[in-house]
Amino acid sequence: MASAHLPDGPSPLVSAKIVIAGGFGAGKTTLVGTISEIAPINTEAWMTAASESVDPIGPRDKTTTTVAMDFGRLTIASDLVLYLFGTPGQARFWPMWDDLSRGALGALVLVDTRQLDVSFAAVNYFEQDSDVPFVVCVNLFDGMLSHHLDDVRQALALGDHVPLIACDARARPQVAGALLTVVEHAMNRDGRHHRSGSPLLRG
């Protein structure tokens, strides 16, 4: 009796949505632009003195702000593509986070230790208001870690179950490593919870 034989062929393409979140000026647009293999799509607007009563000015060298989202794409392997959705950081755009996070495999929450107070809202959102697994990442603006990660974890009141890493949003290899950490964390958590359905979309 002849045995059944499955024809060889390429693995089915899997795509995953990753949210890049964080406070105002945390480096989300820079990170998406650093790693995206396509020209990133962003919706930035110039900041002016007239907007001070609505949005914080943030870092002195920041002249634009994302008012909707950033979008980029990264091929991890021949059968895995990540679609990156950067959230706006200002409080008046937070209602958009629900839509941007819907169906996401995971999230990378960027933190700027120079203005740690603007990071609490993003961390609290993914801890309390979203079921999306997330990784917190300290953005190395000066190319070095200014505070021990244990101290950052304590300052953010971050649970031990949430991975805390650091990377320079301008360095492509470091950004790729951070995104892989998100994928691995999400897949590990998904396996532990035995959830029905998967945010990975086969195309």
Image (cartoon, rainbow, N blue to C red):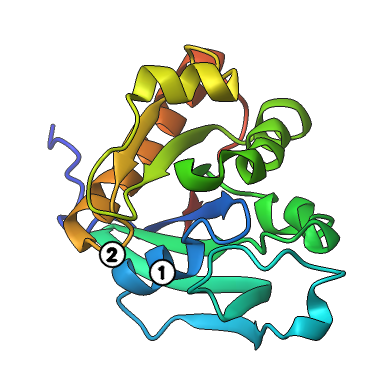
Q: Which one is earlier in the sequence, the residue at label 2 or at label 1?
A: 1
- What x and y, as percent, mark residue 51? 81, 78
- What x and y, as percent, mark residue 52? 79, 73
- What x and y, as percent, mark residue 70? 56, 72
- What x and y, as percent, mark residue 142? 28, 54
Q: Residue at x 72, y 37 (%)?
A: 125
Q: Pointer 1: residues within 10 angstroms few (<14), some, or many (20+)?
A: some
Q: Pointer 2: residues within 10 angstroms few (<14), some, or many (20+)?
A: some
Task: Please identify the quarter of the rendering in which residue 36 is found.
Answer: bottom left
Whether residue 160 sits left or right of residue 65 in the image: it is left
Q: Residue at x 84, y 56 (%)?
A: 95
Q: Is residue 187 visible?
A: yes
Task: Please identify the quarter of the rendering in which residue 157 is found.
Answer: top right
Q: Which mark is residue 170?
A: 2
Q: Are the two marked residues, 2 and 1, in contact with CB atoms closer than 8 angstroms?
A: yes
How many labels were placed on the picture?
2
Q: Which mark is residue 82?
A: none
Circle 1 sits on which residue?
30
- Looking at the rendered structure, the kind of residue marked 2 is Arg
Q: Is residue 162 visible?
A: no
- Looking at the rendered structure, the kind of residue marked 1 is Thr
Q: Nearer the viewer, residue 36 or 82?
A: 36
Q: Residue at x 28, y 64 (%)?
A: 170
SS at circle 2: loop
| 51 over 90 or under it: above or below | below
Whether residue 128 sits left or right of residue 145 in the image: it is right
